[in-house]
Amino acid sequence: MGVTARGLIAGRGTFVLDVPTFEADDGGTVLLGPNGAGKTTLLLSLHGLIAASGVVERPFRSASVFARPSVLRGSVLWNVAIVATAVLGRPDGDVHQRALDILEGVGLGDTVDKDARTLSTGQRQRLAIARALAVEPEALFLDEPFANIDADARPALRALVSSYVQRTKCALVLATSSLLDAMALCRNAVVLQHGHVVHTGPVTTLGTANDPYAEALLAEASFAPTPL
């Protein structure tokens, strides 16, 4: 099951998001647009985290990751295991081992006994990715999920998320300003401006979007500094 919306209208303060139709399947859909275009509002609305009118359909088991994720009291391992146990309802031993494996995969294998509240911002983001994957989601909602993670660690995390999505056919919705993340994780793109969709189509067709923001993203991606 993918993520779909019809007649979606949501407001945050004076901002109004108006999206007549939206679809995201297991190919991954990236939300692009300048600051204030409505990317996060659409993501939150699709996941049911803010009130919106219209009809939204998404899998029951869904998870989110944000650029500034929250953590729970207790150890890093407990943060992942307790959420996975509550969602999956499986024996503690099974979930415990899965949590350990996923934490190792996101690069937190040496922090499992630490108080999660002592982690750096980048480590908290890794923890949020681990916690999201541990519940075996059928839909993933990611908002700048690698924003605070060191550049040398991002490829492995992108590969981890991509592998999960491809293996499970999980529906992915990604809000980002990174064309690299978009190309690595998503097949389709939705470009937003002022709360409205101005372009939809494969990520590879962004060059035909006739949108200033999409043009700027592509220009930045093609820029190669001349060595001094």
Image (cartoon, helix red, strand yellow):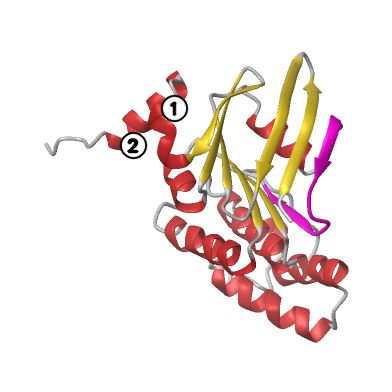
Dot 2, crowdedness within 10 Å: few (<14), some or many (≥20)? few
The picture quadrant where one finds residue 33 is top right
Mark 2 residue type: Ala
The first of marks 2 and 1 along the sequence is 1
Mark 1 residue type: Ala
In the figure, 4 relative to 131: above or below? above
- Residue shown at 59%/57% (left/top)? 123
- Residue shown at 46%/56% (left/top)? 154
Q: Which mark is residue 86?
A: none
Q: Quadrant of the C terminus?
A: top left
Where does the image place residue 14, in percent across and percent down from the top left? 77, 13
- Residue shown at 43%/19% (left/top)? 212
Q: Pick whichever, 216 or 57, lies toward us.
A: 57
Magenta stretch, residue numbers: 50-65
Q: Which mark is residue 214?
A: 1
Looking at the image, how many numbered discs can be counted on the residues?
Answer: 2
In the figure, 30 relative to 151: above or below? above
The picture quadrant where one finds residue 216 is top left
